[in-house]
Amino acid sequence: MKFDNFKEKFTGFCRKVGKRNFIIIGAVALTVVAVGVNLIIFSSNKDDGFDYDQSAGMDVGTTQTTPADTEAEDAVDSYFSGIQVSRQRTRDEAIEVLQAVVDNESSTEAAKNEALLQINKLADIMEAEANIETLIVAKGFEECVAVISDGSASIVVKSEELIPAQISQINEIVYEQAGIEPVNIKIIQR
C-alpha cells in the first residue's frame, strides 16, 4: 500500500517537473561534479610542494623540490601536462552535456538558456585560466596550471623557491584576470 502511494506521488512529481528539467538538473550536477573532481585532484598534492595559506598572514614557508635526476623532473613535467589534459577532458564532457540540452528540440527555452549560460560561464573560466597561466609563465615561471572554481583559484607553479614578491605577482595576475581576491587564492609550488 505504502509503496503504491509513494509510486503515485513520485510519478505525479515527475510529470510536474518534466523530463527536460531533469536533464537540466543532471547537466548542472555533472558540471558541479566535474569541477569538484578537478579540485580534489589539485588539492590532494598539498604535501608535495609549496602551500601558501594567505589567511595566516605573510608567513612564507617553502618546501623545495629539487629533482635529483631527469626522471624526477620528467615526472613534474608530466604532472602539469596530465593536469591540463584531465581538466580539458572534464570541461569538454561538461560542455558536451550542456550542448546536448541546447540542441534537444524538446528542451524548453528556459532549459536552453540555462545551458547556454553554463556554457558561457565555463568558457569565461577557461579563458581566465589560460590568461593566468600565460601571464605567470611570462613572469619567469617554468610551468603553471590555474584552476578556478566557486570564486576561488588554485595556482600550481613549477619553481624552486617562491619569494613574497612572486606571490604578490601571482595574486595580482589572478585578481586582474578573474577578479578573485588574494584571500581566495591558493598557490602551490611543485
Image (cartoon, grey):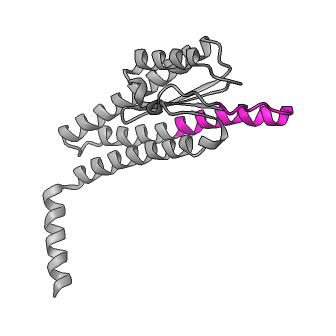
x then y, percent, for residue 143: 65, 23
Front one among 77 and 27:
77
So how many labels did they put on this image? Answer: 0
Q: Is residue 104 above or below residue 19?
A: above
State left or right for residue 185 relative to residue 22: right
Most extreme residue toward the right is 69
State left or right for residue 10 relative to residue 71: left
Q: Residue at x 28, y 32 (%)?
A: 117
Magenta span includes 85: yes
Image quadrant where one finds the N terminus:
bottom left
Q: Quadrant of residue 80?
A: top right
Q: Is residue 71 above or below residue 26?
A: above
x then y, percent, for residue 9: 14, 71
Image quadrant where one finds the C terminus:
top right
x then y, percent, for residue 158: 67, 26
Q: Main secondary structure of the magenta part?
A: helix
Residues in magenta?
A: 62-89
Q: Residue at x 85, y 33 (%)?
A: 68
Q: Residue at x 56, y 14 (%)?
A: 165
State left or right for residue 186 relative to residue 23: right
Q: Residue at x 65, y 30 (%)?
A: 62
